[in-house]
Amino acid sequence: MSENAKEFVVEKVKELMNAASCCADAKAAAQSWLDALGTENEAEAAKNLIAELEEDIMPIDGLIAFADSEAGAQVFGAEKAKEVAAHAKEIKAAGAKYCDCPACAAVEAILEKKEAIL
């Protein structure tokens, strides 16, 4: 991985870990990757990180469906769920493929560098 790519991914991994919307499994995979940088475990940690991030990133249609559901209303609150659904529909119309919360935005940026990481 080039030094520029590595710096970019490290920055995005740290953004992911600091995002309130980042789940514990993604934080753990991210920390493991950071800890493994420059060691013989880096390649395996990179595979684990990418697998976790591909599982966790929220496709925009999934976000819309969740926000429009009863479960979404329970998680976000009824009014916030409506706002999230409306925002998701708006960004989908503008071409978004994924949720744009801080965690998903960081994940999308990291996955764009997937080949450099692996």
Image (tube, helix red, strand yellow):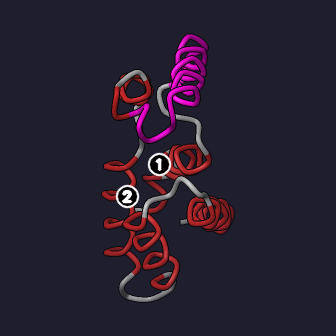
Q: Which mark is residue 78?
A: none
Q: Amino acid at mark 1?
A: Leu
Asked if residue 13 is among those painted magenta in the image, a careful observer would answer no
Towards the viewer: 21 or 59: 21
Image quadrant in which you'd find residue 59: top left
Q: Decide which of 2, 56 is in the foreground and name it.
A: 56
The percent coordinates of residue 85 (x first, y second) are: 51, 22
How packed mark 2 is, by other alpha carbons closer than 10 Å (few <14, some 14-19, many 20 or more), is many
Residue at the far bottom in the pictured view: 39
Could you tell whether 14 is left or right of 35 in the image? right
Magenta-drawn segment: 72-96
Disc 2 target residue: 50
Residue drawn at x 66%, y 60% is: 8
Asked if residue 77 lies left or right of residue 24, the reply is: right
Residue 71 on image: x %, y %: 34, 34
Circle 1 — which element? helix
Query: Within 10 angstroms of label 1, few (less than 14), some, or many (20 or more) residues?
Result: some
For residue 58, above or below residue 30? above
Q: Quadrant of residue 10?
A: bottom right
Seen at 43% across and 79% down, the residue is 32
Considering the numbered disc 2 on the image, is that residue within a helix, a strand or a loop? helix
Residue 111 got which mark? 1
Q: In percent of the image, x 40 and y 71: which residue is there?
A: 29
Give the dominant element type of the magenta stretch: helix, strand or loop. Answer: helix
CA gap, disc 2 and disc 1:
7 Å
Q: Residue at x 61, y 14 (%)?
A: 94
Q: Are marks 2 and 1 in contact (CB under 8 Å)?
A: yes
Query: Is-magenta flag for residue 81?
Result: yes
| Residue 37: image location, x then y, percent | 50, 81
Counting residues from the start of the chain, the first of labels 2 and 1 encountered is 2
